[in-house]
Amino acid sequence: MSPATPHPMIARAATTYAIALGSNRRGRHGAPEREIAAALEALGDVVARSPTVASAPLGPSNRRYANAVALIETAEDPAALLVRLKRIERTFGRRPGRRWGSRVLDLDIVLWSGGAWSSSGLTVPHAAFRTRGFVLGPLAALVPKWRDPLTHRTIRQLAQMVDRRHPRD
């Protein structure tokens, strides 16, 4: 065993991730709310979850979304977790297509307890989460004091900023 290889009996510490879930198309589990519930089961490692909320679509889609946020704990690094999330999306019927189009399931890594991460194809924190009330509201209900590693604002502060810019009807 090389010095860089950890001893097989030593487990890597679990890392906490905030995962945004979205669906606006029926799938094999039924309505979008049922797709979210099934996706939470498929994720595993869920330590907390928000209620599912409805939101207006972004971009060209005309279907309302069901959204939720889950906190998971895993020893996976962000790149490995992304591979797993993409595999789950595919098993739910997600196919490559138009950006912001209708989809059975969308899973995004929003934050992780390791701070910031950047690699080819993945940036954490999620580039747009600070402007999305449908992510910030549910996230603030779970971890209001978690700080964005880039702005150093709490999730509660970010959610309040979005609420002021986009008051609910």
Image: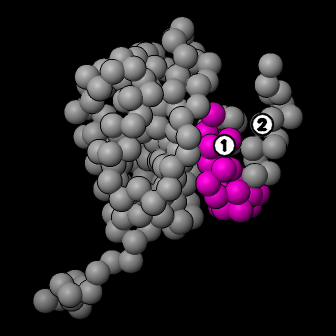
Q: Residues within 10 Å of mark 2 (few under 14, many from 20)?
A: some
The residue that label 1 is drawn on is: 136
| Residue found at x 54% / y 8% | 62
Query: Residue 119 at x, y = what percent?
Result: 43, 53
Q: Secondary structure at mark 2?
A: helix
Query: Residue 78 at x, y = what percent?
Result: 40, 57
Side (left or right) of 119 relative to 137:
left
Q: Quadrant of residue 91?
A: top left
Side (left or right) of 13 relative to 28:
right
The residue that label 2 is drawn on is: 162
Query: Residue 106 at x, y = what percent?
Result: 42, 32
Q: Secondary structure at mark 1?
A: helix
Q: Quadrant of residue 2?
A: bottom left
Q: Is residue 152 magenta?
A: yes
Q: Is residue 156 magenta?
A: no
Viewer-proximal residue, 150 or 66? 66
Is 2 located above or below residue 62 in the figure? Answer: below
Please identify the residue farthest to the right as the structure is shown. 164
Q: Which residues are magenta?
A: 134-155
Query: Residue 29 at x, y = what percent?
Result: 29, 26
Find the distance from the CA under tag 2 to the CA under tag 1.
Answer: 8 Å
| Residue found at x 13% / y 89% | 1
> Amino acid type of disc 2?
Val
